[in-house]
Image (cartoon, rainbow, N blue to C red):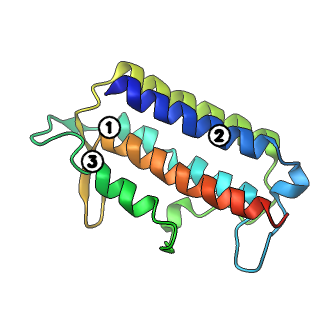
Amino acid sequence: MKTELFNQVETTTNELIQLIDSLSEEQLNKIPFEGSWTAAQVGDHLLKSYSVAETLSGNIKTTERNPEEKTEIIKKVFLDFNTKMESPGFIIPSDTLIAKTDLLMALKNRIDQLKEIIRTQDLSQTCLDFSIPGLGEFTRSEWLYFMVYHSQRHIHQLKNICTFI
């Protein structure tokens, strides 16, 4: 379980970092079309969502169900690219110019924190500090898969943005 999850986190986040790194700062901050975030804003949104590291390191309890029970529904929701989603306010990206080097460094630091959690923590534990409306509390494993599928959704979005900039 840990090795598979670690590999998925690494593969997904490497693709994200490479995609952002391949763009100039001007391209990152260019609005591709009306109503869209910039590539930098997508990166900033993901960075803010990676604060899940704090939830993973917070209060926990022993899980009394399959610790990956909610993984498939998380995958189904995030990888349905036909469904438009609204971002919660606390992870809405900045509307100012975002420096590429700052964004990349912050993303890499957060990703390293998440990888360390995978290496050192019991992923079957349920996290108590935050829950998702309609789905409830997640285990560490489910939160990490949430991060993977959420990132994959936005990598898809970034690739689309890149066709317009």
Instruction: State the image quarter where residue 42 is shown.
Output: bottom right
The picture places residue 101, in percent across and down from the top left corner, at 80, 39
Residue position for label 1: 141
Of labels 2 and 3, the one closer to you: 2
Residue that protrudes farthest toward the top in the picture:
120
In the rendered image, residue 8, in percent from the top left (x then y), is placed at: 47, 35
Query: As drawn, is 134 to the left or to the right of 13?
Result: left
Secondary structure type for disc 3: strand
Give the label on residue 138, or none: 3
Q: Amino acid at mark 2?
A: Glu
Q: Looking at the image, tell me whether mark 1 or mark 2 is earlier in sequence order.
A: 2
Q: Position of residue 73 (x, y in %)?
A: 30, 57
Residue 47, x across and y down, in percent = 60, 47
Residue 130 seen in the figure = no
Q: CA distance from mark 3 to mark 1?
A: 8 Å
Residue drawn at point x = 90 percent, y = 56 percent: 26
Please report the residue visible at 82 percent of the width from the left and 59 percent of the height from the top: 29
